Image (spheres, rainbow, N blue to C red):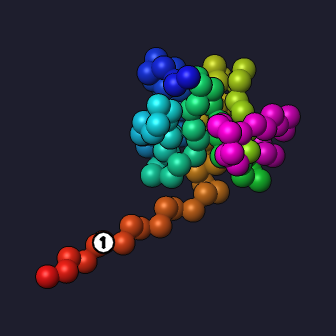
Amino acid sequence: MSSSQDFVDYVVEQIGNAGTITYRKMFGEYAIYCDKKVVALICDDQLFVKQTEAGKAFIDDVKEAPPYPGAKMSFLIEDKIDDQEWISQLIKITANELPLPKPKKKKIKEE
């Protein structure tokens, strides 16, 4: 089951204070970016935030689950999605702890 655009729009609106928020549809689900870093996934209309030590300390009572079969464990955020200040802070904390993505190598044309 894929996620609904309405749910994605709601999450993006809720975390809008965390930084520059964008998303990309991938295989019927969504990757959520904060300041060009993948910080979360939306799968089956559920929010999965990447695990970080600072995020774990902030959440306190952590619920972990994989966003899809075979995936690494993530923080499953359920009831706190409606708390805009809290969820934005979690996303900001997560983004601050994650490294920037490695630049993609440019392909060299052979003649």
Residue 10: x %, y % from top left:
50, 21
Quarter of the picture containing the C terminus is: bottom left
14 left or right, relative to 72: left
Which quadrant of the figure has residue 81? top right
Q: Main secondary structure of the magenta part?
A: loop
Q: Residue at x 19, y 80 (%)?
A: 110
Quarter of the picture containing the N terminus is: top right
Q: Amino acid at mark 1?
A: Lys
Q: Residue at x 61, y 57 (%)?
A: 98
Residue 56: x %, y % from top left:
78, 45
Give SS at disc 1. loop
**In this view, 110 is above or below 3:** below
Q: Which of the pair 44/17 is nearer the observer?
A: 44
Q: Residue at x 63, y 19 (%)?
A: 82
Mark 1 burial class by Cα count in 10 Å: few <14, some 14-19, many 20+:
few
Residue 60: x %, y % from top left:
84, 38
Q: Which of the pair 23/35 is nearer the observer?
A: 23
Q: Which residue of the protein is positioned furthest toward the left in this rendering?
A: 111
Q: Which residue is mark 1?
A: 106
Magenta-colored stretch includes residue 71: yes
Q: Residue at x 28, y 73 (%)?
A: 107
Residue 14 visible in the snapshot: no
Q: Which residue of the protein is positioned furthest toward the right in this rendering?
A: 61
**In this view, 102 is above or below 73:** below
Q: Which of the pair 90/29 is nearer the observer?
A: 29
Magenta-colored stretch includes residue 42: no
Residue 21: x %, y % from top left:
45, 39
Start-end of magenta stretch: 56-72
